Amino acid sequence: MLPEAPTPETVGSITLSPAGPFVAGSRHTFTLRYTAGPSGIEVGGGLRIFPPHRGHTYWELGKVTATCSREAASVEVETFNDHPYTYHHSNPPHIRVTIWGEPLQEGDTVTITIGEHGGYSAGYFRLARVADHAWGGYQFSVSVDVLGNGRRPREFDRPDAFVDLPDAPELDVIADEPARLHVVARPPAGVDSDEFDLVISVRDQFGNLADYEGTLKLESTDPDAALPDAVSVNEGAGLCRISPGRPLHGVARIDGCRTSARRARVTVYDPRQELIGTSNVVAPAFGGEDHHVYFGDLHVMTGDHGRMMLGGTEYAHRWARDVQGLDFTVATNSGADEQSWAEDLRLDDEFTEPGRFVVIPAMERYAVTGHKNVYFRSSEGVPHMPKMSPAEMFEWLARLDLPCLVISHHTNCHSETSRYHAWGPHDFSTIDPRFERLIEITQDRGSFERDEVGGAVSLGGHGSSVQDALALGLRLGFVGGTDNHRGQPGSKRSNLGGLVADEIINGGITGVLAPRLTREAIFDALWERRCYATTSERILLDVRLGEHMMGSDLTAEEAAPFASEREIRIEAIGRRHIDRIEVVCNNETVASCEIDDEDALITYTDPTPLAEVPPVSSKAPDVVFYYVRLIEADGNMAWSSPIWLAR
């Protein structure tokens, strides 16, 4: 009689020590002890071990060794992608332990040491490093290859090639000690208000919320600013939960602050614990009498979406509002079924509070030809969208007849798994101008402004950059969204495409010029392309051609007054010092102005007759467009939506 095929109940068990919790980014030695079950392990078989890696959070494995309790058996250890520890989600660091000499029987043990110390003769071995993202319930993934067929590609998909161990070890990663203060000054709720709010959070060195209790002092560059002298932060007064049983600590909100200065910053500090942080610039008059600049993240994935994500939709909305201090956000999940879509809509409405915080209903749609996000002006009457091709989706939206926007994203890269079957560089022939008026120019994978890799462009070379889209004559304004897979809107720290967030210029939020903070006003400003993108920095930017704001699309009649020359007014306030401001005309940089200050007000005049400006391409000979590229001293950037002139 043939033996029974291995099952999760027969392949054994595994334990982890120490149990933790562990401080984010810390180094340790860990011991995994596997006990063989009734299935045993044949010679050539073994274990495949993945340390926790959800949400693109990875370990460094360090030195890995293994021993076996059966004297006649030996073990071979191989490690894969152990350094650097940021890889694509399909290729995280992992360990392969192979049994040689004699099969393992039930009760035999294999002891795997991750982060071995070494010894006198061997010298120091590298310790393992846990993920730098604080989270509860990180789980190892351990599979048993009973027969030794897991190494054979044609056998890989057989059900007995790898059998997952049930009840794999879990551990908690907690934040490091407080290292800095994150201070956000949020704009007034509308043009009829002069109050601003402060959102303060205490962070560790990796941007995790740190446990903190103390008194923070406040000072402003405007000595007459109306704000308290100090604010107390109580440990454990959690606004939301990072995981079951663990509240968010170290957050504070101060409403009703005022300044009479043209612009001001607020510095918050704790001299006893040596913590300090300075806000972005408060500039009540920026944007003119009719507009304020509101910031939000238009591309956020949550743990309700799938196995690669951390943090559910509720957690993401709370992070955006109470920690990151954003004015608006989204959850661009797939809406895989009617129930999950209805739940996202419910949370979107629950968190929307006009004047304080706005959530725009949204979903993501996938295709081999590229990914698109769909945004709605209201949650009322929006049904669940079935799976369909881009062309079918646009016809479905047309029949739905509700105000909506579609935005293509990460256009100039592919999935790194299969550009032919998963998703590839964006096919711009799928863009439908009835709904697509914006394009994502920056996110956690870097910028997709240009085709050539360099600067903030980390992935490219496929001919589907934002400039390639503009060269086709498409009228697309610019937005930013992180594509954060950890449920943390606005955060640059989501290592997508194998990129290390600390080593590249990345991130993405959108600045919107709107009269008030409501769902309708934010959506309408996006529809009018009255918006710009930044690398997750609160850079203020206003670009105008006469009375025409960024995003304007002038007819030949409207462009006639600018036929002989065009004077573009640019006002900007950086999060930090601005290095330079560049003007781009028809995809060519035509001016670069050194600033070396945190604020700038400049005018660029193009004296070339409009009819003589070289066309961007043969496909768009009758249009001229301008946009502004701002570069801060630390490399962070902003891009204004273009202004188009027909000729």
Image (cartoon, grey):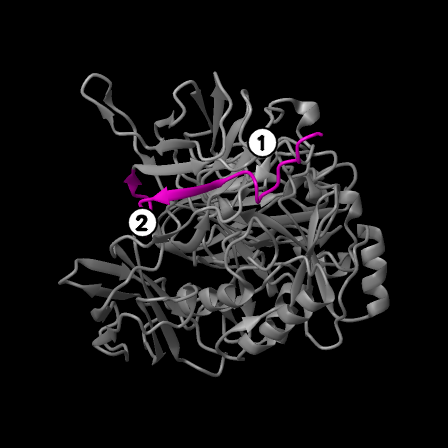
Label 1 residue SS: loop
Looking at the rendered structure, which numbered label has been put on residue 452?
A: 1
What SS does tag 2 mark?
strand
- Give the labeled residue for mark 2: 22
Residue 516, can we see it? no
The residues colored magenta run 1-28
Amino acid type shown at disc 1:
Glu
Q: Quadrant of residue 549?
A: bottom right
The residue lying toward the viewer, choosing from 117 and 92, is 117
- Of the residues shown, which amino acid type is indicated by label 2? Phe
- Of 263 and 538, nearer the camera is 538
Residue 20 forms part of the magenta stretch: yes
Coordinates of residue 646 in the picture (x, y in percent): 74, 52
- Measured as percent of width and height from the top left, residue 374 is found at 70, 60
Tell me, yes or no, if residue 363 can be seen here.
Answer: yes
State the predominant SS element of the stretch in magenta: loop
